[in-house]
Each structure stands twice: as structure tokens, then as C-alpha cells.
Amino acid sequence: MLTASPPMPLELVTAIDDPRLAPYANLRQTNLTRWSGLFIAEGRRVVERLLASEFHVESVLLSDRRHETVLAEWPAEWVADVPVLIVPQRLVEVLVGYNFHAGVLACGRRFEPFGVAETLAICRRSHTVVACPRITGPDNLGSILRNCAALGVDAVLLGPGSCDPFSRRVLRVSMGAPFSLPVAECPTLFDDLISARDAGGWQLIAAAIDGEAEPLAEAIRPERIVLVLGNEAEGLDDDWLAACDRRVMIPMAAPGDSLNVAVACGVMLHHFLWMAPVVPRRAGDDGSAVD
């Protein structure tokens, strides 16, 4: 029996071709939501973070084995105006294309895209931003976003070669970090960051492994920092390295070894956010007039 207290819009769905299920179809094979303005959140904790966020939720999908337990423990306001689709377990697994043990999915709507300038303008907590020109692995990007949210980064900027920050896998690995951490996909990331460096007082620091980089333990942080992370396999290209103000490295015990990019991100962020002394900006470094 489909009941809840207080009442909420529960909808029993038993036909796989029901249009309300369309956003959830073939999740294992596709990421069509990247171009539809929607995204799919999977798993109870991730869906709960979505429901508690400012994102608009199109619908929640619960298996008929889990819905009573889940809904009994959720605040009523989370789903008061959200369609809750109750779907038989076997039908859900056919729909999504894999064994659906979690029993909880949700479809959300993406915010309108925003650029580098708009993002940097709201970075007023830690004045720390992470830029990823080309992170292609969902697991790596998800871990980077989770690190950034946990350690207090203001925002993450992604270049056009990076994977979708709202893909189902990235959201799962990041534990829904993009629901509270501003993440901007920036087609002109390189040019926009150069402008921010020149006019906004932001210092670009490259995570590097070359011999010219300064050891992380010796690195002093500027007041406004953009930590630039390279591609998993190739690192940062020459243009990015030349554009950055400094290069910082994590010394390795054995020559030639390196850390996974997400692990290196966490280590560097902990240093710059929690350990390194800060060099304040001078008056006029942000392009304003000096009194």
C-alpha cells in the first residue's frame, strides 16, 4: 500500500515506456543527460544531498522494496512538491540496465551555465579555486570535487576537455559535492583565467612534477589562489605551465613516481588551506586604484 504521512505525490509506475521514466533509461550505457539540462543522482546519501540543496528536483524514483523505509525517514518538505515514482524492483533494473541495489534515484535540473568571472566573483570564503583544464576520468573528477568540498575550496573550474561533473558516476564518487560546491564548465577557461590573473589578483599555481617546481612544504600561499591540475596521464601542457605564476610539486620517495591527480589535489589543498602562511595582496593587486 502506497501511503505516507504527511501526504506526498506518490505515483506507482508499472510500464517501462512510461514517459516519466525516460530520464532514468539505460543509465549504464549513456550520459545523455549532459545535453538535456538534467542529471541523475544515485544512492540514498547523494539523493538526500540533492533534495536538501537549491537544485530543482524533477522527480525521485524509489524501488517498491525501499520506498516505505526511505520516505518514513525523510523530512516531508524534501518531497512535498516532488513527484515520487514507485517502481517495481525488477522493472527498475531493466530500465537502468544494471542491478539496482541502492533503490533510490532522482532527476535534477542543472543551473544555467556560468563562467569564470561570475564564479570568481562569489569566491569570498577561502579565496581558493581549483582549475581542471582536462580531467577526463569520472572517478578522478569525483574524488577531486569531494576533496574540494571537504577542505573548503570556494569553487571548481573545468575546461572543455573535462568529463561531466554531473554525470551519475561523478556525483556518486563525489558524494554529491556539486550540490553545494560551485562547479563551472568553462569553454574558454585558459583565456578567462589569464584575464583573472592580470586583473583580479588571482595567482595561478600549477601542480607539476618537473625539476623547476618548488617543494610543497616550502610553498607560501597567496591571498587568492587558483590551483591548476593537469590531465591524469599527461599533466599540464606547455601553454598552461607557462601561464601559471608558480609551479609546486610533492616530492616523491622514488624518482619517477607520482601520485594520482585526486590524491595530489587533496595533499596540496590541505597545505594551502590549512598549513601554508599567507602573503596578503598589496593594494592595487586586483586592478583597483591605490589610495
Image: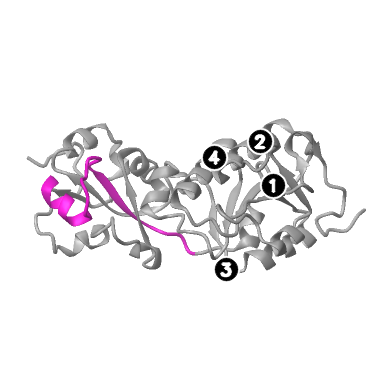
Residue 146 is inside the magenta segment: no
Question: Comparing marks 3 and 1, which lies closer to the viewer?
Answer: 1
Residue at 64% over, 49% down: 129
Q: Which residue matches tag 4?
A: 147
> Label 3, label 1: how many angstroms apart (C-alpha)?
26 Å
Specify the amino acid type for callout 1: Ile
Q: Which residue matches tag 1?
A: 209
Q: Which residue matches tag 2?
A: 254
Does residue 196 sit above or below 267 in this rendering? below
Where residue 224 appears, as percent x and y from the top left, is: 74, 47
Residue 92 is inside the magenta segment: yes
Dot 1 or dot 4: first in sequence order is 4
> Label 1, label 4: how many angstroms apart (C-alpha)?
20 Å
Question: Comparing marks 2 and 3, which lies closer to the viewer?
Answer: 2
Circle 3: element type = loop
User: Pointer 1 and pointer 4: residues touching (CB < 8 Å)?
Assistant: no
Left or right, 39 with reference to 67:
right
> Label 3, label 4: how many angstroms apart (C-alpha)?
23 Å
Specify the amino acid type for callout 3: Pro
* Label 1 Cα neighbours within 10 Å, binned few <14 / some 14-19 / many ≥20: many
- Range covered by the magenta-colored residues: 89-112
Circle 4: element type = helix
> Label 2, label 3: how many angstroms apart (C-alpha)?
37 Å
